[in-house]
Amino acid sequence: MFKKIFPLSAIISLRFLGLFLVLPVISIYAASMTDSLLLVGIIVGGYALTQAIFQVPFGVMSDKIGRKPTLLIGLLIFLIGSLIAAFATDIYTLMLGRFLQGAGAIGSVITAMISDLVEEEVRGKAMAIMGGTIALSFAIAMGLGPVIGASYGVDTLFFITAGLSVFAIILLFTKVPTPPRIKHIYHEKAKTSDILKDSNLLNMIVINAMQKGLMTVAFVLIPIILTSDAFAWKTSDLYMAYLPAMVLGLIAMGPAAVFGEKYNKPKQIFLVSIVLFIGSFLIMGLTVSSTLFIVGVSMFFIAFNMMEPLVQSMITKFAKVHQKGAALGISNSVAYFATFIGGTLAGLMLDISDRATIGISVAVLATVWLLWTLKLQNPTKHAHLFISQDNIDTDKLNKLEHEHIAEWYVNETENLVVIKYVADAIDADELKSKISK
């Protein structure tokens, strides 16, 4: 499994590393080009707006022309956007570069390709690994971004981002395998309404959106507050806030992923993370101590990194096979819109309000989110039965119905019928007898 997903995880992580590298300092960089903090917020979250807009078109394109060509197109757009941002000398050119960076919206395509390549029973682990590599990229970027930006300029970070996209393209054509053809057989096709009516999927969409939205709120606020009159830090000193937060976030990520995946307790991880989000924004909004402010930043990073490895995995676990692509697409689109809105609102509120009001407002919103998440259920643990299609009676298979069978589908490339069922409630031999010739 690892050999199949590592190249794809590396590609998406390199892309996110490029995006994350500038996050710790881009609000200060954009503020040097304009007096409008609203425009600063748009710059911070602007890439997410075009990500949201182009998620579905890229998904459709990948179905028509193939995953690899679609990934190439997305990476090239991202490369062009990074170069435009690197050469930008005014706020609107920088905005164009950020919008183009997001327009290469390949996240859902990579997730779909991992689903194509990895067997159902280990797909949750695969998604967790992908989420973990993204969280690792996030942590690394928080340590390197402020140091490189302060030493060599933020434009250098964009040049590095362009180089990372070139490396990702090389990986795409040298290491990424071709996915198998999967045939999904259902009475009905996936519908958006069905996904939104599923309380667990809807909860995961909200969790994904809130996590990403709060991320851009934080990255508008943290650098600007620390370099304002309240604390008077230099840009080159920002690493002192991000470095301990990065280390603590990395430490928290492993146990959270294990507890969420192995012990099937993602709900508990999400609830703890939201409580940490609430505390982090209250501290960052109200404290006059730089030490306590760093504590707040660290709490934010811990909460973010605890969630990140689990979000995509849980969506794929709650969705049926024929819904996975649509569920991931909807969730990621909503999350990217939330990312853009978070940055924009944070910039607007800095223009018209103070950080205490912002911190309290975010904490109240996160409290509502906490109460909403109480409705989430931990996913049912399923087993998977793999039977050669040659041994299956097709008529019996098409009539297969059982309250403890979640779904079934055909992997045409490997000539297998895959049945997902509750192992504690139904016997594998009984299942075989129902559909064998």
Image: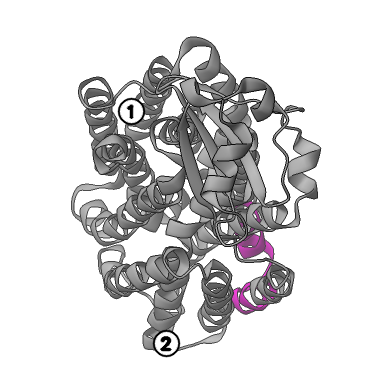
- Residue 48 at x, y percent in the picture: 55, 41
SS assignment at label 2: helix
Which residue is at 41% across, 19% downward? 413
Q: How many marks?
A: 2
* Nearer-the-camera pick, 185 or 194: 185
Amino acid carrying label 1: it is Leu
Residue 401, picture quadrant: top right
| Position of the N terminus by quadrant | top left
- In front here: 353 or 189? 189
In the picture, the disc for residue 292 is 2
Q: Nearer the viewer, residue 205 or 184?
A: 184
Q: Quadrant of the C terminus?
A: top right
Residue 383's mark? none
Residue drawn at (34%, 26%) of the image: 79
Residue 280 appears at what percent x and percent y?
Answer: 51, 78
Residue 148's place in the image compared with 184, above or below, is below
| In-image side of 365 versus 3 (left or right) | right
